Image (cartoon, helix red, strand yellow):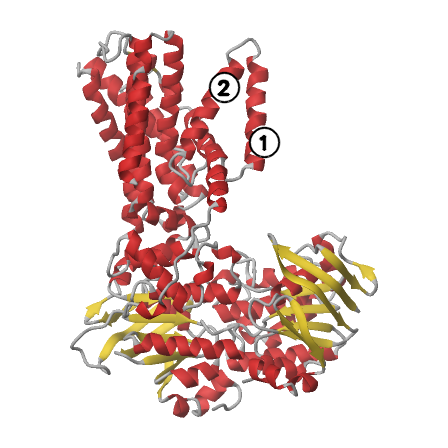
Amino acid sequence: MLEVERIRVSYGAAPAISGVSIRVGAGELVCVVGPNGAGKTTLINAIAGLHSIEAGALRLDGRDLSRLPRHAFCSEGIAIVPEGRRLFSGMSVRENLELGSYRRAARAGRAGSLDRVCEVFPILRERLEQPAGTLSGGQQQMLAIGRALMAQPRLLLLDEPSLGLAPAVVLAVFDVIREINAGGVAVLLVEQNAALALEIAARAYVLEEGRIAAEGRPEALLAQADIRRAYLG
Amino acid sequence: MRARALAGFAAAGLGLSAVPFFGPPAFYESFLYLVFHWIVLAVSWNILSGYSGYFSFGHGAFFGAGMYTTATLATKAGVPFLWTLPLAALVAAVFGIALGAVVFRLPRLRGELFALLTLAVTFVLATIVLNTPIDGGPGLYLSAVPLPAIGPSPSSTFYLLGLALALATLWIAREVQRSRLGTGLFAIHDDEDVAEVLGVPTYRYKLAAFGLSCGLAGVAGGIQAMFISYVTVGETFSIAVPLNVVLMSVLGGSRHWFGPAVGAAAVTALLYAFTAGDYAVAGHAAVGLILIVVILFLPEGIFGELIGALKRRRVPAMPPIDAAGLPAPAAWPGKPEGQALLEARGLCKAFRGVQALAGVDLEVRRGEILGLVGPNGSGKSTLINVVSGHFRPDSGRILFEGRDLARLEAHRIARTGIARTYQIPRPFAHLSVLENVALPAMFGRDAQARADAEREARRWLAFTGLAAKAMSLPGELNLHQRKFLELARALASRPGLLLLDEVFSGLTHAEIDDAIRLIREIRARGATIVFVEHVIRAVMELTDRIVVLSYGRVIAEGDPRAVMREPDVVAAYLGKPRA
C-alpha cells in the first residue's frame, strides 16, 4: 500500500535520512525502531508530507505522493500523531477532535468516531469543553491520538504514541492500535518502547544513522543479539 | 574588548565632531542631525523592544513627553535649553516606568496587546496635552529660546548635540546587550516564564530597559523641539514616529545594538535621496519597495545577516573540556542526609474548575531520589510547577530549608537552589546551546560572571554528552538532545534540589541506561532529586522512595517495590502488576 523508495531528506547540508526504503502492505502493522537521532521522526514526517523529499519516491497504492500539496495527504487517508502533540491549544477538546475528522470521508462518521475515542480515553469525555491547552501532558498525548483516529485513516502514522503516558494508558493505547489495525487500517509505528511495539508489529525496520540497518519479522530481529541488547536490554 | 570599543567610540566622536569646522553647507549638517535623531530613537526603542521582544508602538509618546518638557520649560519657565534636556529624559523615563509598573505585572499583556496598549497611551497623552494648558491647541513656539553656541553655526550645534546623544545611546545599548541585563532581556524574548524560573528577575529587568529606552527618547524629543522650533500635538504624537522606529530596527536587525543604527541611517538616507526631488510620490513607493525586498530576503535585518555570516565563517575552536573538573552541585555542609529538605503542606491548585492539587502533603529528604508517579493528569507536573514558582498555589505551604516558598517569586526560588526541567523542552530558541546552559549559572545561586558561567556550562555540556553541539541553536537538536539540554541547563545553577519532569521518556533501552548513570552521578555529587517518570524501569532502578499521586492527592508512598504492588496503585496507574 505504502511504498517509500530510497528517499533522502536533509536539514541544511547534512542528510537526516538517505536511501531509505520501506513498505507497508494493506492492513499491515509495521514498526520502526532505532536510537534517538537516527531519523525516525524525519521519516514519518516525510511520509505525512510535513517534510519535502529531495530524492526518491513516495507512493500510496501506486500513486505518487511527492508532488502533492501538504493538505492533500490528509484527503488521501493518511493521518499522523506527530512528535510534540501539536494540538490547537486554544480550542476545546471537542473542537480538536472534530477538526481531526475534517476530511470528507470522515465527516459522516464523526459522531461515532467521537464516541469511540471517548471510550478509549474516558478522561477526554470529561474534558470535552475544556481548552486543549489546559490538559496535562499525558492527556494531551491522548487527544493527539484521538484526533488522528477521528480522521478514519487508511494509513495511520504514529510517532511515539506512548510518550508521557502512564503505564495503564500505554497498554490501552496499544490495544487500540491493534484493534484499529485488525479493522483493516495500515499502521506505521515509531516507538521507543520496543518491547511493546515489536509484540504487536507484523514486520519491523531498524533505522540507524539515517539508514535502514535491518528489517524483518520481530522474532527474527530479536534473535540478533546486538538488536536485542540495544532495544530490549 | 571594552577598552578597544571605547577607543573606537572616541575616535568616531572626535572625527565626526570635526566635520562642522570644515564649514560644510548648513543643509548637510541638518540632514546628518536627522540621521542621528533617528539613530537615537531606533536604538533606544531596541533596548526594550528588540532585546526583550516587547514591541512598543508607544515610542512617540515618550519622545513627545520629552519634546513638550523642553518646550514648556524653555518657553514658560525660562529654563535654559540645555538644562531642560536632563529633565526631558527624567519625565519620559518616569512616565515609562510608571506605565511599565502596571503593564509588566499582567502576563496576559504580552505580544500584540502590549503593542496596542502602548499605542493607545500615545493617543491618551496627546489628548491630555492638547486639552490642558501644556499646549491648549495652538502649539508652542521656541523661536525666542536662545540656542547655546556649541558649534560655529546653529545647524552645526544641532549636528553636535545629535552626534553626542547618538554616541551615548549606542554606548548604552552596547553595554546593556553585554551585561546581565541584556542576557536576561534576550532570554525574556524567547521564553519569559522559563527565564523567570531560571533566576532572571524579569519584572525588574523589563522596567529597567523600558526606563532607559524612554529616557533616551525623551532627550531626543527635547533636542528635536528646539530643532523644529514649533511644537504641535498633531506632529509630535503621530503614528509616524513608532512606525519609522520599528521599521528601522527590523530593517537593520533588532538582535544587535548596532542594527537599528544601520536601519535608521539607511531609511533616512533613502527617504532623502528619493523624496527630495520632484518625484516625491514615486520616491516613497520606491522606498517601500526596497524595504519589502530587504525584509523578504534578509529576515534578520541588514546588519543582523552580516554579523550572522561573519560568525558562521569563523566558528571558534573549542579547547577540550575536562568533565572531571565538574563543580559539585550545592551541598549543605554539616547537615545530615535523611532530614526533610522540602516539605509541602496542604498544597492546593485549581485550573478552571479542575482541581489539579487537592491538598498534597509531601516530604523530600536530603540526599534522596524521590520518584513521583501517578496517572496522567494526577498533578505531578503541577506539583513541580508550583514548587518551582511557575504557578502560585491557591493555598498551602512549601517549606524549603525551613523557608516558605509559596509566595516567593520564581526567580527568588531559583536562587534558593531549586532547578527544574520541562516535560516538553523549552530552550531559548535564539540562544546557542552554550548560552542556554550558561544563563542559569549567571542567574542562579552563585550569580557567576559570564566567562565563568560559560566555562561551567561547557563542563555540563560535556557531562550530558552535548559538547559537540555547544555552538548550535536548540532547533538543530533532536528530541533526545533537547531533553539533555534541559538537564544541563537545570544542573548549571548547581541546584541543591533538582526537579526532573520526564527526562527518560522517548529514550531507547540503551539510552535509558546512560541516563540512569547520569542521574546517579548527579546524586553522588550531593544533589537531592525529585523525578516524575512513567518509565517504570528507571523509577525502580533509581528511586529510594516513591510517592503516588491520583486526582491531586497522595494515595501511596514508601519503598518502590512495596508501593508498586499495592492494589490501588496497580488499578489507578499500572494497569497490570509490575516489578
User: Of B333 and B538, which appears nearest the observer?
Assistant: B333
A43 over B279 or under it: above or below: below
Residue A147, labelled with which disc?
A: none
Quarter that holds the N terminus of chain B: top left
B195 w.r.t. B76: above or below:
below
| Residue designated by label 2 | B271
Task: Report the residue at 40% width, 66% height from top.
Answer: B462
Let me know if residue B142 appears in the view: yes
- Image coordinates of residue B529 in percent, x first then y, are 33, 75
Asked whether disc 1 touches disc 2, contact meaning CB atoms under 8 Å apart, the reply is: no
Q: Is B295 left, or right, of A212 in this rendering? A: left
- Residue at image coords 32%, 61%: B456
Q: Amino acid at mark 2?
A: Leu
| Residue B307 on image: x %, y % | 46, 39
Tally the marks: 2
Name the residue beneath numbered marker 1: B293
Circles 1 and 2 on the same chain: yes
- The residue shown at (29%, 75%) is B525
Query: On the image, which quarter does residue A180 sit in?
Result: bottom right
| Residue type at the position of mark 1 | Val
Marks 1/2: CA–CA distance: 16 Å
Q: Chain of mark 2?
A: B
Relative to the observer, which residue lies in front, B235 or A13?
A13
Secondary element type, mark 1: helix
Which mark is first along the chain, 2 or 1? 2
In the rendered view, would you say B533 is above or below A105? below
